[in-house]
Amino acid sequence: MKLLDNKVALVTGASRGIGREIAKKFAEQGASIAFTYLSSVEKGQGLEAELAAYGVKAKGYRSDASDYAAAEQLVNDVVSDFGTLDVLVNNAGITRDTLLMRMSEEQWDEVLRVNLKSVFNLTKAATKPMMRAKQGSIINMTSVVGIMGNAGQANYSASKAGIIGFTKSVAKELGSRNIRSNAIAPGFIETEMTGELNEKALEEWLKNIPLKRAGQGEDVANACVYLGSDLSKYITGQVLQVDGGMLM
Ligand code: NAP
């Protein structure tokens, strides 16, 4: 018996980084996986075969999480292809880092739309099949900078703080329907998103991490397995930090 046997999961932004690791861990734990990608088409298509090798049903969809109508269509497609939806992981996200003085309206709007509005879009659509099934687990990817703020990331940290408020509100609204809503706040995880940082910035981050290493996508994926599985069936409205102890 695996932790996610008989569950259908949808993971947004799984072509690369943390999302890809979540999709693989979920497949390893027996879930059927629907996942999305947007610009990394080849990588997204390649993941389908990689997941199928775990012996589970897997299908990729090219879909923009920040587009309301596309998100609704996506969830309809997933339900018609897989029959239901048990776990939603809102992972897709971007950065457009710069100091507030230089931040353009476009950089603000784009980050809020892709990081925060996407979570509203997908969650709203996913709650329909989850209410029908009288169960569900929603996992939203926030960040430690959504809790503590970060110079050069006013747009990103605002979007991630917004996700935390949204997660807790949904937990309160849908708890009586047996739909859980939790957030994961990764600290410093090695992906393309953090690959842009220079050596000096990296050293500064590591100084403040008690476990003295950067996190891996797998570390975040393991936390998602827990929140997606019935092991966490009495846990909702929480923000689980996966940060090596960086922020406490
Ligand atoms: P990443 O390597 O840059 O990957 C981002 C993923 O999001 C890609 O698969 C990308 O797909 C997808 N994506 C971007 N815009 C999208 C859209 N509009 N619709 C659908 N998919 C979209 O980033 P990551 O480091 O894995 O981060 C994943 C999540 O964790 C993000 O929410 C991020 O904010 C959060 N996080 C990361 C860290 C970290 O240290 N890395 C820390 C805290 C939180 P395409 O390439 O196909 O467009």
Image (spheres, rainbow, N blue to C red):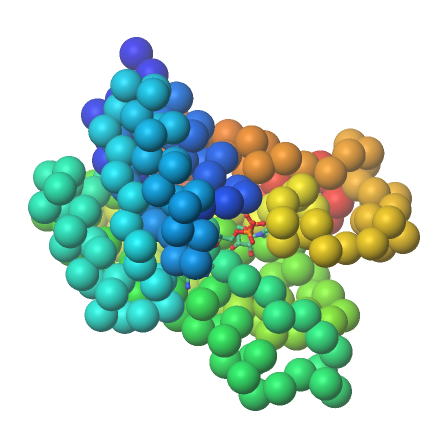
Instruction: Residue at the far top: name it.
Output: 1
Residue 105 against residue 92 in the figure, above or below? below
Q: Is residue 197 left or right of residue 161?
A: right
Is residue 188 among the parts visible in the rendering? yes
In the image, 191 versus 224, the foreground residue is 191
Q: Residue at x 71, y 75 (%)?
A: 98
**Residue closest to the eye, 244 or 203:** 203
Image side of residue 55 versus residue 12, left or right: left
Which x, y percent locates residue 58?
27, 33
Q: Nearer the viewer, residue 200 or 3?
A: 200
Q: Position of residue 7 (x, y in %)?
A: 24, 31
Q: Is residue 96 left or right of residue 59?
A: right
- The residue positioned 58% from the left and 32% from the top of the image is 219
Rendering coords of residue 6 (x, y %): 21, 25
Identify which residue is drawn at 38% across, 28% down: 50
What is the number of callouts on the image? 0
Q: Is residue 124 visible?
A: no
Quarter of the figure with residue 126: bottom left
Q: Residue at x 61, y 40 (%)?
A: 242
Q: Answer left or right for 207 relative to 169.
A: right
Q: Is residue 99 above or below residue 142?
A: below
Q: Is residue 216 above or below residue 247?
A: above
Quick one: quadrant of the N terminus?
Answer: top left
